[in-house]
Amino acid sequence: MNITYIVGLVLAIVVFLLGIVMGINVPPQEGQKLIEFTPGNLINFFDAASIFIVIGCTFAIVVASFPGSTLAAIPKHFGIILNAKKFNPMGYIDELVDLAQTARKNGLLALEGKANEQNDPFFKQAIMLIVDANDPDKVRAILENDIECMSARHEDAASLYDKASSVAPAFGMVGTLVGLINMLNGMEIGGDGASSLGKDMGTALITTLYGCILAHMIFGPIANNLRIRDGEEVLCKQIIVEGIMSIQSGENPKALKEKLLTYMSQKQRETGGGGKGSGGGE
């Protein structure tokens, strides 16, 4: 489970709700407490019309902006950001060093059995490309193109939430205009329009609030987490590409490890990055 995402989201919600119900009296007057809670304030921030306008219109515009295949992957996106399993660069480095040692002893053809043991399709493909004696430039081109296409797909997924993040506040403003128009139309001298002013003004302001909450507490963090996951996966695949090319050229395993460690921070090198065992897949 991605603890930081969950903790951050829950903390933001809790702080927001506390800000609604909590009052701080500095200095407290006679008969007052320093901190007072008024749970009844919560009902002031619920407005069905505002929810309908902001959430409904945001959802509709997102549906209109992306193909069905991208929308169908939304449950997968949540699985990705909630999954605590991180990509392990050090695990790939250790495996590549083992492959380099095997190749120096028994030749590149001996790596075919190692390729079949891989759970990561990209790693398996990379090994088989050098086992089949492809030209080094061709191998690098294929693998780097695979990385670019994968990253482009990931960016398409993140852009869905960027779109929602930009649309939600816009429809918050639309709801504000709706509330103000209704309020102005109800301002009739001598009529009963005054009774609806509070409700219309509430809709006008709360829709903006809902739009900001959706954009900055829901959609923004999702897009950012997806990009972080993409960066982790791209890094691991870049390590694989560099390692595979070095193995094909017959580089010394020790020198190979030193080269691949440059992809990692000094702290990751010192801690070992979690040792063996790699996570893969999109």
Image (tube, rainbow, N blue to C red):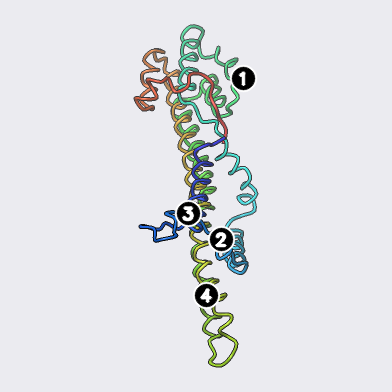
Q: Secondary structure at mark 3?
A: helix
Task: Give the residue at mark 1.
Answer: 116
Image quarter of residue 200: bottom right
Residue located at (51% from left, 7% from top)? 106
Residue 210 pos. (x, y %): 53, 62
Task: Give the residue at mark 2.
Answer: 42
Q: Quadrant of the C terminus?
A: top right
Tell me, for residue 216, which label it has, or none: 3
Q: Secondary structure at mark 1?
A: helix
Q: Secondary structure at mark 2?
A: helix
Q: Nearer the viewer, mark 3 or mark 1?
A: 3
Badge 1 or badge 4: first in the primary sequence: 1
Q: Nearer the viewer, mark 4 or mark 2?
A: 2
Badge 2 or badge 3: first in the primary sequence: 2
Image quarter of residue 272: top left
Mark 3: amino acid: His
**Foreground residue among 194 and 174:** 194
Q: Is residue 100 left or right of residue 76?
A: left
